[in-house]
Image (cartoon, coloured by chain):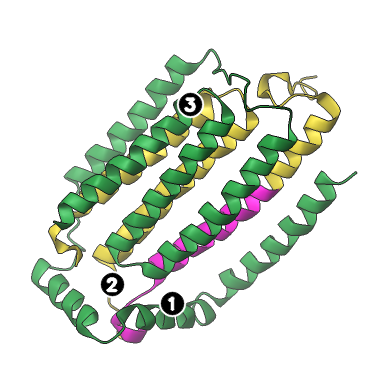
């Protein structure tokens, strides 16, 4: 059952991702991109990272897609215009295919012996899943982790966000 | 929850997302489309980070609630940086469009020398 759900979500995600790079107009690409983001959120749910799934929907589906649509609509009437691909598509196909091949073969062949033994993993999963409101626990742990061991990265990212905010306004004005 | 799905399924999906993003970023002429390809690549990386978090997180004794959260923290950082990158990138595209009236990357040859 879970494998079936994974298959459906994977097909939706990858299919709409392919539609993003093969759609005729930029606007249609953006629509497919939204569906692909939703599929990735589904993968997060399957992995048990519920907070990340919500964040994915908020940030990617809610914010970045709208930003993309704004850019598309501000720059000419791209809705009707065909968006072409350049001359190096054969090379790009070879590059992307070899990246996929290497990553896929490595991911399949590597013995992830660091992995929890299955019985330990399922025990942990049930232990964490059987507790009341495991998602809340996880958000709690995530917040503590962000504010303790990853505090420096957290602060740096906030400064970067501020710089990007100011920079985007300054660049796009006048 | 997850043990019925082997780890490499997730890795395969992530690799697929990343390669499709590579293909899109390399082939499309439209600058907005290239940004979309980059977003797809970032999403593939995120799926990898979360999958590794789920399957091979070292369970440190000091980790709260029995979970190390490093993978999810990575993913959150990537999402934040992707938002910043999209905002600045689209602002740049709009700014260049004002002066050059095009979003085709092949026409952005001002600095060719």
Is B100 situated left or right of B104 in this image?
Answer: right
| Chain letter for mark 1 | A
Query: Residue at the spot x=53%, y=62% of the render?
Result: B77
Q: Residue B61 in the image: x percent, y percent?
A: 30, 85
In the rendered structure, which segment of residues is drawn in magenta?
A: B62-87
Q: Residue furthest top?
A: A87
Labels 1 and 3 touching (C-beta < 8 A): no
Q: Which residue is mark 1?
A: A142
Q: Which residue is mark 3?
A: A23
Q: Which residue is mark 2?
A: B58
Query: Residue at the spot x=58%, y=21% of the render?
Result: A83
Q: Residue B82 in the image: x percent, y percent?
A: 57, 52
Q: Secondary structure at mark 2?
A: loop
Q: Residue furthest right?
A: A174
Is B53 situated left or right of B107 in this image?
Answer: left
Display colour for chain B: yellow
| Chain letter for mark 3 | A
Q: Point out the frontmost of discs 1 and 2.
A: 1
The answer to which of marks 1 and 3 sits earlier in the sequence is 3
| Tags 2 and 3 on a common chain | no
Note whether A30 is above or below A137 in the view shown.
above
């Amino acid at each position: 059952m879970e494998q079936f759900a994974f298959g459906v979500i994977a097909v939706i995600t990858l299919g709409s991702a392919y539609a993003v790079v093969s759609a005729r107009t930029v606007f249609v690409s953006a629509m497919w991109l939204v569906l692909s983001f939703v599929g990735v959120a589904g993968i997060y749910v399957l992995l048990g990272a519920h907070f990340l799934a919500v964040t994915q929907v908020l940030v990617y589906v809610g914010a970045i897609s709208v930003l993309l649509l704004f850019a598309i609509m501000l720059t000419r009437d791209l809705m009707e215009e065909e968006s072409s691909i350049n001359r190096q598509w054969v090379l790009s196909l070879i590059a992307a295919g070899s990246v996929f091949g290497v990553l896929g073969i490595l991911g399949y062949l590597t013995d992830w012996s660091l992995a929890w033994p299955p019985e330990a993993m399922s025990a942990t999963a049930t232990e964490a899943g059987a507790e009341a409101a495991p998602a809340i626990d996880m958000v709690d742990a995530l917040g503590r982790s962000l504010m303790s061991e990853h505090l420096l990265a957290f602060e740096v990212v906030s400064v970067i966000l501020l710089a990007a905010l100011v920079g985007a306004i300054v660049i796009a004005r006048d | 929850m997850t043990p019925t799905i082997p780890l490499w399924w997730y890795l395969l999906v992530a690799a697929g997302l990343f390669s499709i993003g590579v293909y899109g970023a390399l082939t499309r002429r439209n600058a907005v489309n290239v940004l979309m390809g980059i977003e797809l690549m970032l999403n593939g990386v995120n799926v990898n980070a979360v999958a590794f978090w789920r399957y091979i997180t070292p369970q440190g004794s000091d980790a709260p609630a029995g979970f190390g959260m490093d993978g999810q923290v990575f993913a959150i950082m990537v999402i934040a940086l992707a938002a910043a990158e999209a905002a600045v990138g689209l602002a740049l595209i709009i700014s260049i469009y004002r002066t050059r009236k095009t979003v085709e990357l092949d026409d952005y040859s001002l600095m060719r020398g």
